[in-house]
Amino acid sequence: MEFNDAPFVPGEDPEDIGSGRVTHLYVGSSAYTGNPMCVRGWNRENGASYSILKGIVNRSICRTCLRRAEKGLPAVVSRFRKTRIFR
Ligand SMILES: [Zn+2]
């Protein structure tokens, strides 16, 4: 799917079960998938990585991801990278 002529791939968290589940958007394609459009897309290792089933659209798309993609805003970096101090 595309927003503002930029490609995105929806990704479903296979371990996220129950009600209220959403599919987050990731920049790029299933062949090369980049960062998610909201911090909840970083769903592993306390926000350092993610694990998704690419191209799954059974769930509704995350509203935050959708709004950011429609506005042409950039993907978000992981919480891990933002807060970790390397020595
Ligand atoms: Zn999202």
Image: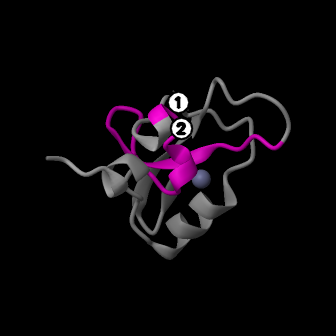
Classify mark 1: helix, strand or loop. Answer: loop
Q: For the residues carrying marks 1 and 2, which lies nearer the camera in this image?
A: 2
Where on the picture, by quarter, is residue 49? top left
Classify mark 2: helix, strand or loop. Answer: loop
Query: Which residue range is magenta in the image?
Result: 20-45
Residues under numbered marks 1 and 2 in contact, where contact means CB atoms less than 8 Å apart: yes
Is disc 1 surrounded by few (<14), some (14 to 19) or many (20+) residues within 10 Å? Answer: many
Q: Earlier in the sequence, mark 1 or mark 2?
A: 2
Q: What whole-number distance in Å separates the C-alpha atoms at marks 1 and 2?
A: 9 Å
Residue underneath mark 1: 52
- Any magenta on residue 52? no
Can you name the residue that lies furthest to the right here?
A: 19
Residue displayed at 49% across by 33% down: 44
Residue 51 x %, y %: 49, 29
Residue 3 x %, y %: 50, 63
Residue 47 x %, y %: 47, 42
Where on the picture, by quarter, is residue 4? bottom left
**Viewer-side residue, 2 vs 34:** 34
Tag 1: amino acid: Ile
Residue underneath mark 2: 43
Can you name the residue that lies furthest to the bottom here?
A: 71
Tag 2: amino acid: Asn
Tally the numbered discs.
2
